[in-house]
Image (spheres, rainbow, N blue to C red):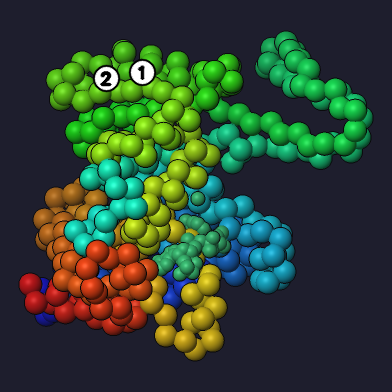
Amino acid sequence: MKYDKPITMRRAIVEMDGDEMTRVLWRKIKDTLISPFVSLNVEYYDLGLPERDRTGDVVTREAAKAIKRLGVGVKCATITANAQRVGEYHLKQMWPSPNATLRAALDGTVFRAPITVRNIAPAVRTWKKPIVIARHAYGDIYKGVEMRVPGAGLAELAFTSDDGNRSVVPIHRFDGAGVLQAVHNTDASIEAFARACFRFALSSGQDLWFASKDTISKRYDHHFKDVFERVYETEYRDAFTTVGIHYYYMLIDDAVARVVRSEGGFVWACKNYDGDVMSDMVSAAFGSLAMMTSVLVSPNGQFEYEAAHGTVTRHYRRFLAGETTSTNPIATIFAWTGALRKSGEIDSNTELVGFANKLERACIDTIEGGQATRDLTSLSVEPMEALSTDEFLAAIKARLAKD
Ligand code: NAP
Ligand code: MG
């Protein structure tokens, strides 16, 4: 790649900064691998916890609006505040998860795909191809309301329609203290999720699996099953047949058992919580959380790219103590390449698309060439050189600049 004339971007994308070790990585990635080659056109939002606290979390909501307006965003990992973080950062309150806010605002589906490399064998021996997890990004416990039940009494679930009709079902008669939870979802969101999954399966030529617990949850989960079935039969069956792919519904526990014995190479649609948990399992089994990419796709065609992992707090503590860290930047780099490629595709900017592809190739070639961060070298099937984050970024840059 030539340095003298950076690639120009016609449209702005939304850049969302984050926290801790990934915030450190963010800057290094931009300085080393992006800014020398691309004249960045971004609208910047600082979603780091101090700025979310200062703005009363307005900055997160503004970022979501900006993605709706501009169409493409790239996000650094952020801290989800909990009681411990409230103390650590002296927060005004326990702000909601930025990812939950963005997902709710865009009502999108999150697709998570592992980046596979030749020299890292998946922990599950039968897996030969990536497994893409499609996580429903709206509702269920992420929009749940909860209550501590102080003592004996009757819990009921009530709904009052706008025209005044009220239906009530008993939940449980408590003999003593306990807990309560109410969750919801909407037909519109479930349908959008189903369509996003069928479309993604079609465009990537992979089978689609969907699983829930409909035998136990006869109204809630069963409704998900019915919606998927209806959308498939009325809108996608013919296209699936033409492409030669299949849609399978199964029980979630059956799906888990089948996934572990499969070869991979399919899209696994998961309800919100299942997707949260299973994506971490799948990424860990494919190698490292640091090799899992994530993209939130809205029904209106907006895209938000990020790494699937968090802010890598343990490494950040060591970084603050002055130690050299070996934090893997790959998933965060692929968030940038994903966003730049999408922006290039929308604008027919072949140079930008070409750059994104080259940068990804340089990352994979560096790892397959035997150099990586420690999380990967320890998993490799052949001897590798363990590098610090800075050394690894320099090695990727050297390959990129050679092209
Ligand atoms: P994490 O940041 O994903 O890290 C968990 C562990 O996974 C790390 O300690 C590290 O293991 C390994 N790891 C993850 N990413 C790595 C990388 N790039 N390179 C090398 N190793 C990596 O999860 P967490 O520690 O549970 O969460 C930390 C913070 O991130 C929390 O505040 C959480 O709220 C937030 N979070 C944010 C997002 C998001 O913004 N999308 C997602 C998840 C969590 P070793 O220590 O063994 O090396
Ligand atoms: Mg998770």
- Identify which amino acid the numbered label 2 is placed on: Tyr
Q: Position of residue 275 (x, y in %)?
A: 46, 41
Which residue is drawn at the image coordinates 16% and 63% (left, top)? Answer: 361
Query: Which quarter shows the C terminus?
Result: bottom left
Q: Is the C-beta separation of discs 1 and 2 under 8 Å?
A: yes
Checking the image for residue 231, the label placed there is 1
Q: Is residue 227 above or below residue 374?
A: above
Left or right: residue 73 compared with residue 161: left
**Is residue 113 in view from this perspective?**
no
Residue located farthest toward the left when viewing the structure as drawn: 403
Q: Is residue 127 above or below residue 239?
A: below
Earlier-in-chain disc, 1 versus 2:
1
Which residue is drawn at the image coordinates 66% and 66% (left, top)? Answer: 85
Count of number-bearing discs: 2
Q: Which residue is the site of mark 2?
A: 236
Q: Position of residue 191 (x, y in %)?
A: 42, 24
259 or 295, which is in the foreground? 259
Q: Is residue 20 above or below residue 200?
A: below
337 or 318, which is in the foreground? 318
Query: Which quarter shows the N terminus?
Result: bottom left
Left or right: residue 8 compared with residue 157: left
- Identify which amino acid the numbered label 1 is placed on: Val
**Is residue 127 in view from this perspective?**
yes
Which residue is drawn at the image coordinates 39% and 28% (left, top)? Answer: 210
- Quadrant for residue 168, please give it: top right
What kind of element bears circle 1? helix
